[in-house]
Amino acid sequence: MKKTTLSIEGMTCSACSNTIDKYLKKQKGIEDSLTNLVLACTTVTYNEEIVNIDDINKYISEAGYKSLGVYKEIDRTKELRNQKNLLFLNTILIIITLYVSMSSMLHLPIMPLFNVYKHPKIYSVTLFILSCLFIGYGSDIIIKGIKNIFKRSPNMDSLVTIGILSSFIYSTINTIEVLTGSYHLSKNLYFDSVVMIIFIVKLGRYINNLNNEKTKDAIKGLVQITPTKALVLKDHKEVEITIDEVTEDTILICKPGMRIAVDGIITSGTTHTDESFLNGESTPVKKVVSDEVIAGSININGYIEYKATRIGPKSTISEIVRLVTEASNTKPNIAHLVDRISGYFVPIIIIIALLTLMIHLILKQPMNEALVYFVSVLVISCPCALGLATPLAIVISLGTCAKQGILIRNSKVLEIANKIDTVVFDKTGTLTKGKLEVTECFTYSDYSKEELINIVANLESKSNHPIALAFKNYITKNIKILSYKEFPGIGFKGGIGKSSFYVGNDKIFKEFRLTKGKIQEEDEKKLLDGCNSVVYVFENKQLVGLIGVRDSLKDEAKDIIKELKELKIDTFMLSGDNKIIANRIGKELGIKNVIGGILPKEKTSLIKQYLKEGRKVMMVGDGINDAPSLRTATIGVSVNGSTDIAANSSDIILLKDNLLKIIDIIKISKKTLRIIKMNLFWAFFYNLIMIPLATGFLPIKINPIFASIAMVLSSITVVLNSLRLKK
């Protein structure tokens, strides 16, 4: 199965996105379709052996919409400018139309030719011509509305179309009657309602488009953060090239104050970079030779040369934008519920409108009055606000999270993160820094501490074991090693001069039949009490020293446990390290539920057990050994930084290794869900109040013009409420 995201043109409400999804899912070879109204795109999962992109584009066209190809952030500046110009032109026309239509009613000076009493024919024909111009302006609405009615997928356009055409046809028939001498019918023309509805709908869509652009600011910001040009050295001269000319392994230059053009590895120079756009952290990061640099980060204070490694769609930024877009296209359960409601909403409104028309006629109301109420119900019920309520909030939240260094891969996370009652932490690389350090050394021979550590560091240089990395920077003098043999899970034996050294963990005693004295046990206890892993060093089977190696806690580790407790969330620590060290670290952090000495598959089994107990579990790990556990948990959070994003198996990636972001996730989830519920409340409340008024059966009545204005205001309310999530 392949997954592709396509840009879509022509969607106006949730019924449109539902129409596309339903139609695509009916087609052979298409497994799934998730359409995003706000981002105007659809993510299609399909079998390449059965269908291809051209087929999918054709299906989208058959559904009444247009595919613009593979999704990319489209610059809509020109399109919005054209919409603005057309609105300006039609604003002049609508002023003329309303003046001709309503000047006598409002006691304004009446132009002689357009006096309804003196020249009813000219008056009627003028309004007919002006309304025809507006019918042309709103032809896209009418065409889509009619198509969707025939496809049995009526949407907002369908409601507006029925209302417009009903008023237009009724008024056109009356105009013909006026031309044949029935002058009194010139007062029963509703061309002003036709033009006003079209104008207000177009105005509303223009405002929505402007606001939708604001919701995508975070995603657009990521796209636009990378420069369009780069510097290279050619014949010892600096040459500026476009990003499209950069290939992998190209050596690029970056001077202080410039942005890194593409992802790469430093080959020369040192500097500090500002990666706040990626992870929300303003502290500069030191970069030296062999370190990675990320496209878009700012080179603060050094001249560097770097080799391009990931360009175009492979870059970190492109991958983040892709994942945020895909996450925007996933739907939380509450969105699926709204989609189901929207599927029934439009047909129900059409039935209510028809019943309103029939009842008024049965009650012997004039046809023109019955038609006003019929049109008012259709126009005021357009499900714009309902369709925007969830996707707007989701897009804004995902974009805001991305700017803060929280990459959410599935929007369902925003719905369930606030329900988490249990957080399970891996230890190494999650609660600790994942970098072992030598903390203490006890020596029982003529060797000084520095000499003993230097000997062990030289021997450890032959090993790939994680503990060997702790000694990497402690070689002060190179020593010739004559022999070396490693014993997995225990340690190693090495020859230096005439001496044989045995170095390892506490299993070394049984393996080589070694012993330790009582004095050494006191030192051993001190190291263990300090949460150190103990490295035992023997020379010719005589204990010559103990070295403490410890993985230090992250700066924010204690704070995150404290804050989770304040939120009444249970915390667990699962570690492959020995039980004594795991328990002591757990005690230092304030975690009561600690299980040490377990394998990755045992972690997964424990998480399954917690889930069976009815817990909502968040697993926080490094994304490598913990991959099965991350996938099993209700929500998996990876703290492996900004590298290898595509291959990650978690639901959330913390681009900055800061555990306190977990609290942000929970808070953002709560606020997002609250905003969505508020949006849905106002959308439903609006329809609950306004539809009865529009039927004309209550003392307060609404005509189509006010109905169209009310419809736009309801959408603006939802947009403005959603924009609060940007703070």
Image (spheres, rainbow, N blue to C red):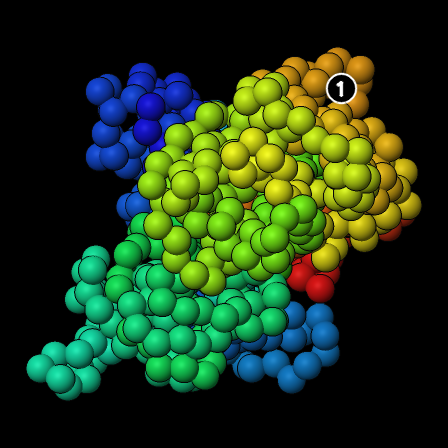
Q: Residue at x 79, y 39 (%)?
A: 519
| Quadrant, the C terminus | bottom right
Q: Position of residue 344 (x, y in %)?
A: 63, 26
Residue 191 sits in which quadrant? bottom right
Q: Which residue is mark 1?
A: 610
Q: Position of residue 279 (x, y in %)?
A: 57, 60
Q: Residue at x 35, y 54 (%)?
A: 315
Residue nearest the observer in this picture, 613 or 507: 507
Q: State left or right for residue 581 relative to residue 620.
A: right
The three-letter amino acid code for the residue at tag 1 is Tyr
Would you say residue 515 is visible in this rendering? yes
Would you say residue 624 is visible in this rendering? no
Q: What element does badge 1 sit on? A: helix
Measured along the vertical axis of the image, is residue 571 above or below residue 316?
above
Measured along the vertical axis of the image, is residue 113 above or below residue 358?
below
Going by the picture, which residue comes out furthest to the left?
235
Q: State left or right for residue 50 relative to residue 213.
A: left
Q: State left or right for residue 92 relative to residue 573.
A: left
Residue nearest the observer in this picture, 105 or 339: 339
Q: Residue at x 39, y 57 (%)?
A: 478
| Quadrant, the N terminus | top left
